[in-house]
Every structure is written in structure tokens, then in C-alpha cells.
Amino acid sequence: MPPRSNSQDTKASYRLIGNTSRRACTIISGDSIVSQTNLLYKLKKVVYSTRKFRVTIYPGNDTLLVMAMVMNFFMEK
């Protein structure tokens, strides 16, 4: 008889919601936001091309995983 495990599944599940043309996406894990991206802008004017964007990664998250997810999302276009 195999031993029973009382621990729950510890795999994290992430959802990525966004728009590639606006360079905007949000990565969600459970009910908390892990990361957000948006275009670089200054005073309601787009300063940079639409190829450059800002990434905000909230503390306590795996930065390499977030960057891989974001780059994969934008490169699929």
C-alpha cells in the first residue's frame, strides 16, 4: 500500500492576460498580480517606439520566469 501524502499540490499556476499591439500584459498567480507591462510614456505622449515597454515585477516572484513568459508572449506575434 503506497504512503499517503497530506500535502497539497504545490505547482503554481499562472495566467497571462494582455494585448501584444499595446505591449500590455498582466501575469496573475492565484488571486495576486505577479507582473505588469506597459508602453513607455511621458506626460500622455508616447516617447519611445512601440517596441519598447516597461516591466514591473512585484517582490517575491521569480524574475526569470516572468521575463520568459513576457518575452514568449510578445514574440508570438
Image (cartoon, rainbow, N blue to C red):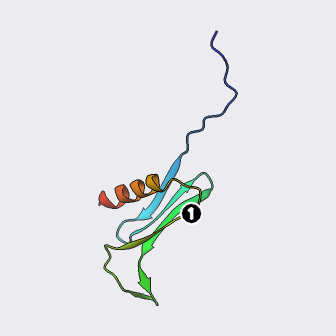
- According to the image, label 1 marks what residue? 58
**Picture quarter with the C terminus:** bottom left
In depth, the one of 4 and 18 nearer the eye is 4
Side of 53 where 11 appears, left or right: right
**Picture quarter with the N terminus:** top right
In depth, the one of 17 and 59 nearer the eye is 59
Farthest right residue?
Answer: 6
Q: Is residue 14 above or below residue 77?
A: above
**Residue 41: where, in percent of width, then height?**
42, 83
Residue 8 image-quadrant placement: top right
Q: What element carries label 1?
A: loop
Instruction: Please name the residue shown 31% across and 79% down the image.
Output: 49
Inspect the image, locate mark 1, and give the three-letter code of the amino acid beneath it: Tyr
Q: Residues within 10 Å of mark 1 (few under 14, many from 20)?
A: few
**Residue 48: where, in percent of width, then height?**
34, 82
Farthest top residue?
Answer: 1
Residue 9 image-quadrant placement: top right
**Residue 34: where, in percent of width, then height?**
55, 59
